Image (cartoon, rainbow, N blue to C red):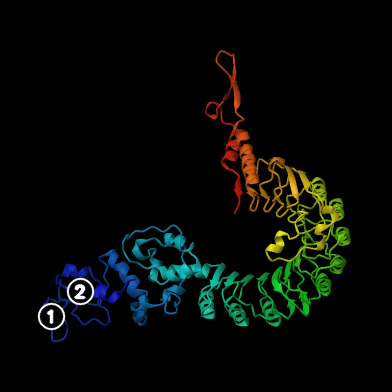
Amino acid sequence: MHHPHPHISSSASAYSSAAAFDLKPAKRRGSYNCGRCGLPKKGHVCQVNSGTAPPSTTTPTSSPAAATIENSSSASCPPQLTPLRQSSHLRRALSFDDVDIRCDSPERDLEGYDSPYSGTDLDPDDEIVSGGLPAGFLWEVLRRLPPAGLLAAGGVCKGWRETTKRLWRAAEELRLMVPPRGQLRFMGSVLKKCPSLVRLALKMESDVDATMLACIAFSCPNLESMEISTSNTAVNRITGDELGRFVADKRCLTSLKMEGCSNLGALVLSSSSLSTLWLSDLYSLSKMVFNCPNLKEISLEFSRQENDTTNLTTMVDGMGRTCPKLQNIHVASARLSHAVVLSLTAANLRGLRMLSLVLGSEITDASVAAIASSYSKLELLDLSGSGISDSGIGMICNVLPNTLSRLLLALCPNITSSGIQFATAQLPLLELMDCGMTICDPDSQNSPSDESGDNQLPNALNSKLHLMYQKLIIKHNRLKKLSLWGCSGLDALCLNCPELNDLNLNSCKNLHPERLLLQCPSLRNVHAAGCREMLIRAIKGQVSDNTASLGNQFQCKRLADGSKRVRAPDCLSPQTSDDKKRRRVMEQQCNVLVD
């Protein structure tokens, strides 16, 4: 940081010649030394010839460097700001109230600056910052720092503070972890630096209430997206009325995602701009109204407590009338039933493409028939935790063969390997399939989900469909991800999927190594946690064989006398596009994850 008074006024204290005087700037207010000889003025009679020296008010012009420092220290800075600049190195990093007046000037382009005065200490407006570093370089370095690091960098020097202030003013997206102490002061000091902020994501480590919403509403007038997540010890105390007022006031808000919404009580949201809404940990809502005509995506996750009293049928019925543009719906609740599905199908949402109804054990094959008859253009269907059987899978395949690309049927105990094979055979566009915990061990009474503390599966686990171990054969040309986690009743597996890159076999304890066949050359990750050691070795051997088979495809050439054909290595054969692709595939080896 540049201090004008001591740096310039004391530089000529030992000189008395006119040439030396021409190299120093003019005298400034507050100097008690003689302008000619540098001695104290009190009781002093200067002996230097006044004719050889210019007047003390003359602006120095003989030295370009001195002129630059003069312009940056006196000409552009008002005298009344001098005391603040002298003590600026004692400021805290969060306090930028006493910045120089030049911070309000129009910003310059920070790209492509050179350093004509390397090693000098110039201001950022002169294209050089502390240490002779070009402002463009400093901008690229500081813009990669997290918010906490950027706040600390603002307290280094004036040049860094100017650059960080420009970064804050240009920021459109901010992700913060709010500390437990002084969260309002911290948020206020950060948000006031970002007038252009449109996207905000907060990780709260302490309780959050309506005061935080008021701070955000006041500091971010153009906010378009807000996400609030909470730690394990934090509690979200925002009520439904407070959240409704916030959404109604923010007319630019298009996306709202919030965790820990267990204290809403009643929720009424009215917004013409809101298009995405995610709320989790909902509990016993007496009223839920969404008056959002442009809402396209909604995700509602309810608490898994048994005494939840939310009326989902009324909520879904009203949502279908007031949100006609819905495309993605996700509802996770143990209170999902066939009546809720009927209310959803009666809404006739023509644009619906993704439907996820999770943990509804009362959803049956009749519910699947209602969904298939009303929504024939679904691209994603998630009925995990439901009571559907192989017959429901047949209905899905008959109606959605040309659109469905993602099917998730985890925790469905009535589904067998025959239903899974039928789905992969009848859905040619399928890219993702999750069948975790569907094929369970008939001899086990306690499933892995019981050991982890999750909800117990229905008693249908021990039905007649699961009295023997099952085998699974899948051949699909577009399948990329397959999840069979927890299928302890699976003892044989054969996969012929050239595009498969992720396979989950966690807790497949009874899968025999000699009954495993993986013909998946694009496989990148195989999850095998909880499997037997022999199975893990078999998986590693098969994925390595798939990679090695690509490396043995060398061209065959005859010897010089034409008597024998030999395989020519890559160094002796011309490089083709197929060879380059093969080498690229060999470099990407498969990972077997056992932790």
Q: Quadrant of residue 363?
A: bottom right
When the figure is inspected, residue 51 is found, relative to residue 403, above or below; the finding is below
Residue 389 relative to residue 330: left or right: right
Which tag, 2 or 1, sits closer to the chain's start?
1
**Horizontal and vertical percent position of residue 560:** 55, 15
Residue 71 relative to residue 17: left or right: right
The quarter in which the C terminus is drawn is: bottom right
Report the mark closest to the observer, 2 or 1: 1
> Which residue lies under the disc numbered 1?
46
When the figure is inspected, residue 337 is found, relative to residue 115, above or below; the finding is below
Q: Nearer the viewer, residue 285 or 403?
A: 285
> Which residue lies under the disc numbered 2?
54
Q: CA distance from mark 2 to mark 1?
A: 15 Å
**Horizontal and vertical percent position of residue 50:** 15, 77
Crowding at dot 1, Cα within 10 Å, few <14 / some 14-19 / many 20+, comes out as some
Residue 245 relative to residue 556: left or right: right
**Horizontal and vertical percent position of residue 251:** 68, 75
Q: Nearer the viewer, residue 396 or 100?
A: 396
Residue at the extreme left of the image, as rendered: 47
Q: Quadrant of residue 462?
A: bottom right
Question: In this view of the protein, can residue 593 be seen by the observer?
Answer: yes
Residue at the extreme bottom of the image, as rendered: 43
What kind of residue is marked 1? Cys
